């Protein structure tokens, strides 16, 4: 019977609550008179009609103030204020009826007693109904229990969203604020985080949702570290900037990512730097469909260029980034161009036709093993693509040309790194010409999280498939930065360039890839398999360093580095080649590429980049 009651349509449930009020309101009036008279059988014959008037006076007020719109199972303590307001208005109207009806036989003080009892009866009926509904839900609820860290606004909205869904059932809140600990939020108890592990075990809950979108990365990291070895599956909400109008949706919830483990808060952008090369200018992004290129485009549109040109050789990647940009309400033109930076004539015509003022050159082959086995394609795209784009920029009087470089260009052990270092040397050589009006600069940084070819999505897929997680070497380390932060710093560094500058982004502390793999397994609620005992869920296997791969990466060739006005951007002073010498050897390198001689290409690379040591 009770299960049928829980499954009734909402309209029927509202009618049932209305019927209960029809009974409770006259009962409250009778109780108040009985208490005032001190007898269980007071004489009410002379004003019996008032017991019929009370519900017809009060229920319209309840309807008007929205008491019947509240969803019973999600009622919170605020319902008391609604009941208080409604009953108070009804008492005032009832008093007016008694005065105008000249009812002298009813004790006036019983109205005060009625006011108190009516509030108690109506509020209690709601809370009893809520308790019954939730008990029935728990009786047959097969949803997964989840705890929520953060009992603030985001936590409340998240709990309500989860409670109305078919997958998860919130069972506990944890909050650092002592004032809310021990209270109930939408019927869910708020606990001290120090009790979190015991509470979750008692409630058989293995999932924790961090609902603190405004918390710093440092604070998130502290919370994550508290739970990462406890077999708890951690999930989180995005930052406040990603939540629209403060509304939390189920699809906003994501697994805890590596960016939450970095523990480093991004520095707010310097608006004057980020806008100087973009605002009201024609901007070209090469490799616009790639990981960095697409994020550069997303950051650029926030700063209202006059026109944004997207150059990409992969059709689907170009289509995807164009559609992504057009989702935003923009008041400038977006021009998608299918093309190759190696096509010099196309680049010159493109820059001349649209009057390009700023170029962000992100087009490159970056996957180390693939470039190592495709030497000529890598050198052609990375070196001569940069050369073609930069010469077209000079010819088209482009104001600023920014090359996206990599930490693998520092003392490279692979063709990809050597080709990117040579690309830097090309721009440094071109910048030596005093007649050149184009400002060239390079921005060098390490790995970005979630980029194509990154270990993070690979590890996620391997964990999802039950393992093993493959790590090349137990001691390998890498620098990591989020894609949005990297793109934002690139835009700011580009504004600082004077000509031939090499900017290096502060990547923070390097991360041991083995530790990263272990943390990702633990954050998935699983255990790393012990190689000796065989206990655990996911094993880690070492595959050996790939061709051209280093144990660790560096960001600086020498020690001559100085800080800029931005706390995350440094500038390096490094040796470069005379343009006349470099230009001749570039011709030799191109001829070697066209003839298909990998050995000669590597030899010329070695001559031009002395730090290059084949791994």
Image (tube, helix red, strand yellow):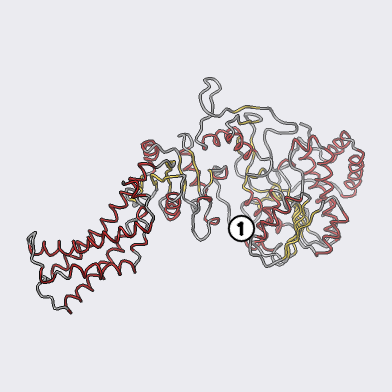
Q: Is residue 176 above or below residue 197?
A: below
SS at mark 1 in the image: loop
Give the position of the C terminus as an image quadrant.
Answer: top right
Residue closer to the observer: 288 or 19: 19
What is the x, y in percent for residue 327? 64, 60
Residue at x 80%, y 59% (from the top left corner): 438
What is the x, y in percent for residue 530? 53, 24
Q: Quadrant of residue 28?
A: bottom left
Residue closer to the observer: 17 or 456: 17
Residue at x 23%, y 58% (from the top left corner): 121
Q: Residues within 10 Å of mark 1 (few under 14, many from 20)?
A: some
Asked whether residue 182 is in view, the answer is yes
Residue found farthest to the top: 532
Q: Is residue 409 left or right of residue 19?
A: right
Q: Is residue 566 left or right of residue 417?
A: left
Residue closer to the observer: 49 or 415: 49
Q: Is residue 19 left or right of residue 503?
A: left
What is the x, y in percent for residue 261? 54, 42
Residue at x 32%, y 60% (from the top left corner): 15
Q: Number of marks in the image?
A: 1
What is the x, y in percent for residue 601? 87, 37
The residue wearing badge 1 is 269
Asked whether residue 502 is in view, the answer is no
Residue closer to the observer: 317 or 153: 317
């Amino acid at each position: 019977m009770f299960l049928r009651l829980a499954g009734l349509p909402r309209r029927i449930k509202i009618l049932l609550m209305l019927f209960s009020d029809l009974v409770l309101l006259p009962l409250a009036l009778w109780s108040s008179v009985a208490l005032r008279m001190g007898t269980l059988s007071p004489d009410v014959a002379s004003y019996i009609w008032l017991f019929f008037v009370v519900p017809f006076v009060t229920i319209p007020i309840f309807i008007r103030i929205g008491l019947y719109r509240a969803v019973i199972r999600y009622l919170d303590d605020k319902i008391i204020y609604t009941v208080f307001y409604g009953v108070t208005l009804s008492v005032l109207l009832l008093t007016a009826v008694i005065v105008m009806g000249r009812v002298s036989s009813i004790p006036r003080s019983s109205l005060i007693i009625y006011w108190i009892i009516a509030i108690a009866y109506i509020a209690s009926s709601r809370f009893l109904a809520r308790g019954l509904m939730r008990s029935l839900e728990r009786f047959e609820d097969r949803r997964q229990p989840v705890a929520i860290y953060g009992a603030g606004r985001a936590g409340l909205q998240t709990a309500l969203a989860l409670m109305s869904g078919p997958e998860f059932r919130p069972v506990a809140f944890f909050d650092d604020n002592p004032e809310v600990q021990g209270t109930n939020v939408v019927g869910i108890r708020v606990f001290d985080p120090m009790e979190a592990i015991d509470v979750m075990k008692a409630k058989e809950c293995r999932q924790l949702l961090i609902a603190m979108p405004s918390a710093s990365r440092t604070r998130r990291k502290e919370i994550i570290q508290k739970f990462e070895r406890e077999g708890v599956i951690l999930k989180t909400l995005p930052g406040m900037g990603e939540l629209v109008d403060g509304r939390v949706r189920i699809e906003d919830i994501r697994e805890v990512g590596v960016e939450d483990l970095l523990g480093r808060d991004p520095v707010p952008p310097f608006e004057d730097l980020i806008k100087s090369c973009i605002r009201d200018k024609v901007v070209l992004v090469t490799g616009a469909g790639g990981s960095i290129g697409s994020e550069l485009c997303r950051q650029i549109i926030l700063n209202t260029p006059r026109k944004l040109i997207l150059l990409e050789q992969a059709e689907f990647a170009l289509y995807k980034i164009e559609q992504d940009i057009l989702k935003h309400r923009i008041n400038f033109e977006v021009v998608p161009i299918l093309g190759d930076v190696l096509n010099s004539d196309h680049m010159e015509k493109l820059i001349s036709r649209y009057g390009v003022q700023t170029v962000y050159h992100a087009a490159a082959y970056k996957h180390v093993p693939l470039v190592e086995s495709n030497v000529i394609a890598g050198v052609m795209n990375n070196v001569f693509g940069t050369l073609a784009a930069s010469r077209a920029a000079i010819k088209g009087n482009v104001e600023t040309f920014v090359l996206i470089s990599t930490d693998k260009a520092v003392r490279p052990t692979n063709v990809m790194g050597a080709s990117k270092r040579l690309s830097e040397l090309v721009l440094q050589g071109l910048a030596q010409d005093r007649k050149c009006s184009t400002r060239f600069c390079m921005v060098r940084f390490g790995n970005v999280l979630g980029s194509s070819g990154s270990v993070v999505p690979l590890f996620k897929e391997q964990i999802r498939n039950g393992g093993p997680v493959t790590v090349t070497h137990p001691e390998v380390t890498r620098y990591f930065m989020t894609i949005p932060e990297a793109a934002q710093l690139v835009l700011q560094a580009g504004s600082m360039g004077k000509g031939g500058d090499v900017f290096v982004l502060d990547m923070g502390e390097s991360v041991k890839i083995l530790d990263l793999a272990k943390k990702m397994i633990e954050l998935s609620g699983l255990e790393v398999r012990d190689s000796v005992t065989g206990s655990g869920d996911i094993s880690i296997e070492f595959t050996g360093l790939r061709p051209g791969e280093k144990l660790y990466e560096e960001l600086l060739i020498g020690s001559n580095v100085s800080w800029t006005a931005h706390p995350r951007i440094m500038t390096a002073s490094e040796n470069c080649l005379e343009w006349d010498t470099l230009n001749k050897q570039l011709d030799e390198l191109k001829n070697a590429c066209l003839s298909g001689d990998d050995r000669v290409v590597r030899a010329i690379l070695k001559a031009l980049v002395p730090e290059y040591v084949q791994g």
